[in-house]
Image (tube, grey):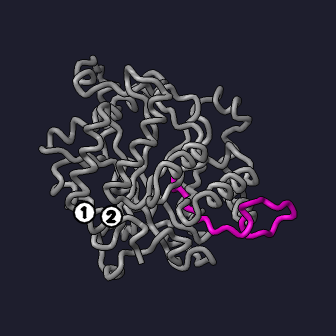
Amino acid sequence: MTGTDAGGGPRPGCASSPGLASARLSVLDRSLVRAGRSPAQAVRGTVAFAREIEALGYHRFWVSEHHGVPGVAGSAPTVLASAVAAATSRIRVGTAGVMLPNHQPLVVAEQFGVLEALHPGRVDMGLGRSVGFTEEVRRALRTDRAAAEEFEPAIRELLGYFDGVHPVPALPAEGARVPAFVLATGAGAGVAGRLGLPVVVGGPDRETVLAAVERYRAAFVPSSRTAEPFVVVAVNAAVGATEREAALLQIPEAWAMTESRVRGVFPPLLSPAQVLEQPRGERAERYFRQARRGQVHGTAEQVVEELDGLARAAGADELMLTLNTHDPAERLDSYRRLAALTTPLATPSSTRS
């Protein structure tokens, strides 16, 4: 992968070193709504958060796509990415991801073409295959579960617009070099490998992540965009002054995920104290524990050690960190504590070779 297509390769002088010595650190924000606040505040908060993350030296800032979910305001990732890019100056901006089953590839190409024209050299295109959360949402999106099976052809069509091989020109995308990443959920790892694209792998536990990375590497075919496998591992990580403080930061999202399984609704985030006051039956307790699997938390030193082990095991080129808690100041403090130990790893992209 060239530096242009990858949005930056390994750190100068560390290309052959494993673990965090050669992995970049980036951030994903899903614009979750917090109890007592509005969805509009959540979206504006994402833009403000991106400026703070850039100041801390992280490499990328990505936003997500969800539809019809009361607790998630991030519904239009290319629009939000445009606002983030306009509010920042150095950090790479992208999506994790645009869900192709919900969109026409031509329109996606045009949107990213506009983004790249406005913010040249800073835009990433993360692509996913998820469909709407409920049948009602899928009807509103004019799609269905079967659309996910057309993910690979849709990516090929989308990339073809950038390459100028379609009879319909996608301006200003045609000829633009926008790095494309595939979000690996199940079959997505094989799709990324066959298309020769970077992969973003997440999962409920380490074993699931490593298995997806192995499928990706086994399927990988070099392409004009990516000469060799490029792995980004997504991980939910929280850093606090103590291990217990860090663990509390992850409770709000774990509870919202539990509610989504028990009641079918992902609600706004409560504070950790409010969550701990909620009655939990056996079923809710089981889902709550499942939601906390795979999360990394602790002091900065503990988290760095665990992330280093994960990066080594996966051969990761990059870690995409996420943390959704009730208090935005506590979330920022978590990223600040981690950056304090990993500043050389998270030098702003404008200073890279």
Q: Residue at x 46, y 53 (%)?
A: 88
| Residue 328 falls in image quadrant | top left
Q: Amino acid at mark 2?
A: Ala
Q: Residue at x 70, y 30 (%)?
A: 139
Task: Give the residue at mark 1.
Answer: 342
Check disc 1: other Cα within 10 Å, few if <14, some if 14-19, many if 20+.
Answer: some
Q: Depth check: give the residue in front, 215 or 243.
A: 243
Q: Amino acid at mark 1?
A: Thr
Residue furthest left as drawn: 242
Q: Main secondary structure of the magenta part?
A: loop
In the image, is residue 182 part of the stretch drawn in magenta? yes
- Residues under numbered marks 1 and 2 in contact, where contact means CB atoms less than 8 Å apart: yes
Give how far across and how far down residue 41 sits, in percent.
45, 29
Up-down relation of residue 260 to residue 7 (above or below): above
Q: Depth check: give the residue in front, 105 or 131.
A: 105
Range of magenta residues: 162-185
Query: In the structure shown, which secondary structural element does the residue marked by tag 2 occupy?
Result: helix
Check disc 2: other Cα within 10 Å, few if <14, some if 14-19, many if 20+.
Answer: many
Residues at marks 1 and 2, CA–CA distance in whole angstroms: 6 Å
Residue 212's mark?
none
Q: Residue at x 29, y 32 (%)?
A: 327
**From the image, which quarter does the C terminus lie in?**
bottom left
Give how far across and how far down residue 306 sits, in percent.
23, 58
Q: Is residue 143 visible?
A: yes
Residue 346's mark?
2
Give how far across and how far down residue 227 sits, in percent.
55, 79
Give how far across and how far down residue 315 sits, in percent.
36, 71
In the image, is residue 340 part of the stretch drawn in magenta? no
